[in-house]
Image (spheres, rainbow, N blue to C red):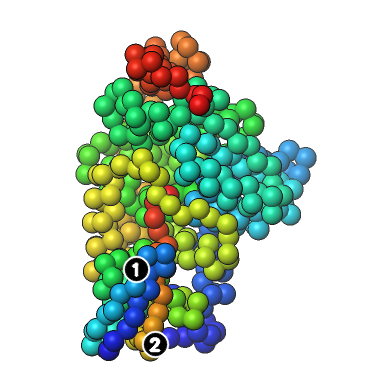
């Protein structure tokens, strides 16, 4: 099988487009899709200038998605004085797992020579995910705690780093799974929130909460997960490939399997789900904007984070974990 | 056709299939073609291509985020 662009030996076949591509044309195609998404989403504001550049904070975990995102953004914008890239890595306190992925992050940012901030749950909250998974004071999956802590750290540090945008490495599979889960839950407000928070192009998003949150974007969301991984392999990027030992998103796993089976039998399913969902979420977001029925936002009485409650969910969970530790007579955050 | 399939970092499998594609080999070792690729002489090959080698490696590309 040869590349349909140049006749060199193909390294992959994209069933959804029917194309066979060689290494060079495949890698260019991944890069092109990311750049087109950056353009289509109006990621770089017209107001950005060499004298007043935009700061883009990239959530860098060391996994293939965030490594590929950081690599291509660097290739694209390293010489553009209107953009400053900063990598932000979170150490959740998962022994073995995150230590190795942090090594991958450091070798990437050293090689690219980009600013890199590393923060840990231990320093931020006085806890480690290994302890949280063991204590589990709320009877939830570890990912449920970790997601709340991660969003808090990402948004606080994005603000502290004076970020204009917070970019994450979500790929097509991630986004199609989230879209399908939102559709199946029937929660229209969640779809509207998804659109305005991270999915919609910047010229179509509402700005109701523009002062409270650093806007997020997912420039890799047109590229299937396997292609992201194949790109990382072919470009020999330093990535850490292992499943988090606490991973337990059973429902998402079910949706992932369903989607991959559909994709095998009906190539292009993930793309068509996203095309329809994005348009639908845009209409729903417009419908709900300014209707006054959304939750009222205030400040957490403990940490000041934007929240709909007196105490934000993060402070609530941190307190629960510390109380469980005290009851068990175990000190978190130290060996 | 008889093919020895080495799953990188895991076990080797002996696979017998009539006129297989590389994608069939991935499925034969209980992986999904959306999460793995076949390497021939260290190079990825398209999963719809007919198998031309009696020994290949399968590289799992996706194992969590």
Give coordinates of residue A314: x percent, y percent. 42, 22
Please state which of residues A25 and A119 is positioned toward the viewer in this rendering. Answer: A119
Give coordinates of residue A126: x percent, y percent. 50, 22
**Residue appearing at x 28%, y 70% in the figure:** B29
Place residue A159 in its image quadrant. top right
Residue that badge 1 annotates: B11
Q: Nearer the viewer, mark 1 or mark 2?
A: 1
Is B57 on the left or on the right of A165, as rendered? left
Name the chain letter of the residue that bears numbered label 2: B
- Bin the neighbour count of mark 2 within 10 Å (Cα to Cα): few under 14, some 14-19, many 20 and up: few
Place residue A60 in its image quadrant. top right
Place residue B14 in its image quadrant. bottom left
**Residue appearing at x 50%, y 84% in the figure:** A9
**Vertical arrangement, residue A161 with respect to residue B45, above or below:** above
Give coordinates of residue A85: x percent, y percent. 65, 45
Residue that badge 2 annotates: B53
Please state which of residues B31 and A168 is positioned toward the viewer in this rendering. Answer: B31
**Residue appearing at x 47%, y 39% in the figure:** A95
**Vertical arrangement, residue B48 with respect to residue A250, above or below:** below
Is A187 on the left or on the right of A146, as rendered? left
């Amino acid at each position: 099988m040869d590349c349909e662009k140049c006749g060199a030996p193909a390294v992959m076949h994209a069933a959804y487009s029917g194309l066979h591509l060689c290494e060079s044309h495949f890698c260019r195609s991944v890069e092109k899709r990311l750049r087109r998404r950056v353009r289509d989403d109006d990621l770089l504001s017209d107001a950005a200038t060499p004298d007043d550049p935009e700061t883009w904070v990239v959530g860098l975990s060391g996994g293939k998605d965030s490594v590929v995102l950081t690599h291509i953004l660097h290739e694209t914008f390293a010489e553009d004085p209107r953009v400053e890239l900063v990598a932000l890595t979170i150490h959740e306190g998962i022994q073995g797992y995150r230590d190795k992925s942090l090594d991958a992050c450091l070798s990437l940012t050293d090689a690219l020579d980009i600013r890199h901030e590393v923060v840990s749950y231990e320093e931020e909250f006085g806890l480690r995910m290994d302890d949280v998974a063991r204590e589990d004071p709320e009877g939830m999956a570890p990912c449920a705690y970790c997601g709340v802590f991660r969003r808090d750290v990402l948004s606080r540090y994005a603000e502290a780093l004076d970020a204009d945008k917070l970019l994450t490495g979500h790929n097509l599979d991630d986004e199609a799974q989230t879209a399908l889960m939102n559709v199946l839950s029937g929660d229209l407000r969640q779809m509207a929130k998804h659109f305005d928070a991270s999915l919609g192009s910047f010229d179509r998003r509402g700005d109701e909460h523009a002062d409270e949150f650093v806007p997020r974007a997912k420039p890799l969301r047109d590229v299937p997960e396997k292609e992201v991984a194949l790109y990382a392999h072919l470009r020999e990027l330093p990535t850490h490939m292992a499943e988090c030992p606490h991973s337990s998103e059973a429902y998402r796993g079910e949706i992932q399997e369903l989607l991959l089976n559909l994709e095998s039998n009906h190539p292009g399913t993930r793309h068509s789900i996203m095309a329809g969902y994005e348009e639908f979420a845009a209409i729903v977001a417009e419908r709900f904007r300014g209707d006054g029925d959304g939750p009222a936002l205030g400040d957490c009485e403990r940490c000041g984070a934007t929240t709909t409650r007196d105490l934000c969910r993060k402070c609530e969970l941190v307190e629960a974990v510390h109380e469980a530790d005290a009851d068990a007579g175990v000190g978190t955050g130290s060996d | 056709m008889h093919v020895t399939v080495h799953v990188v970092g895991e076990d080797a499998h002996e696979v017998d299939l009539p006129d297989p594609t590389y994608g069939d080999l991935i499925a034969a070792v209980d992986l999904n073609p959306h999460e793995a690729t076949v390497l021939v002489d260290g190079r990825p090959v398209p999963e719809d291509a007919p198998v031309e080698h009696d020994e290949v490696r399968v590289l799992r590309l996706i194992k969590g985020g």
